[in-house]
Amino acid sequence: AQTVTQSQPEMSVQEAETVTLSCTYDTSENNYYLFWYKQPPSRQMILVIRQEAYKQQNATENRFSVNFQKAAKSFSLKISDSQLGDTAMYFCAFITDKLIFGTGTRLQVFP
Amino acid sequence: ETGVTQTPRHLVMGMTNKKSLKCEQHLGHNAMYWYKQSAKKPLELMFVYSLEERVENNSVPSRFSPECPNSSHLFLHLHTLQPEDSALYLCASSQDWGPRETQYFGPGTRLLVL
């Protein structure tokens, strides 16, 4: 079975600090794509960052970066210089034939 | 605004009612999806349409009936729902259907079944 595990239901961080959200997944496929989505309280799910599994280089998108460890099936998200607007649910997901989501991590950024 | 809109944003219905959820995408995409989001559960894929043809139906009860009249619009028709169907229903679209595609989500319809 293909699964995504986000072991941190809730996390908090102070503004301007760095936080890392963890994600592990399980699949027998070799080619797939990984995503982090953000769902703010308004509930519009927004793509944060995307990683292609065949690429060893970790994806970066401004303050967001990932640590992709394919052998360990780990795909963590690092948010640098956290901002109040980063407060949201964060979902890790991967796609082979369909998009599989984790249960999410609720991140609270405090001033 | 991501280019995917959903109406209504909130819906309360009784178990004997019939209602429809609407999704519209303004991105020129060819694939559209319905997901169910329940508290503390991963998003569940319900239906996938590619070029207006249904390509996936994930064992969804027949009380949920999708319709895709064209590549920009997707409906979810609801009838004789159960209280456990209360959830956030998300629509998404992608350029095409396949593993390379990034899906873009709408804001969701919060459904409460009484």
Image (spheres, rainbow, N blue to C red):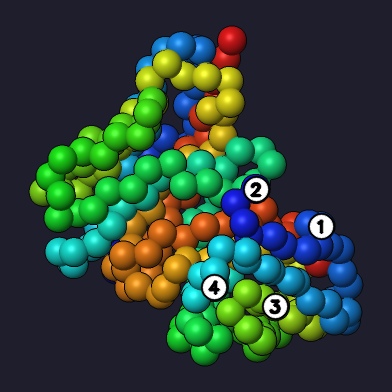
Please say whether residue A94 is visible from this viewpoint: yes
Task: Name the quarter where the C terminus of chain A is drawn.
Answer: top right
Query: Callout 4, which amino acid?
Result: Met
What residue is shown with label 4? B32
Question: How far apart are the two marked residues, 2 and 4, measured between alpha carbons?
Answer: 17 Å
Q: Position of residue A89 (x, y in %)?
A: 54, 39
Judge by depth and name the residue closer to the eye, B38 or B77.
B77
In-image side of A18 versus B93 (left or right): left
> Residue at the location (52% across, 89% down)?
B53
Which residue is the site of mark 1? B10
State which chain disc 1 sits on. B
Q: CA distance from mark 4 to mark 1?
A: 21 Å
Nearer to us in this view, B96 or B110: B96
Badge nearest the viewer, 2 or 4 = 2
Q: Label 2: which residue? A: B1
Residue type of the residue flagged with mark 2 = Glu
Q: Nearer the viewer, mark 2 or mark 1?
A: 2
Left/right of residue A94 with respect to residue B32 in the rendered view = left
- A61 vs A75, nearest the viewer: A61
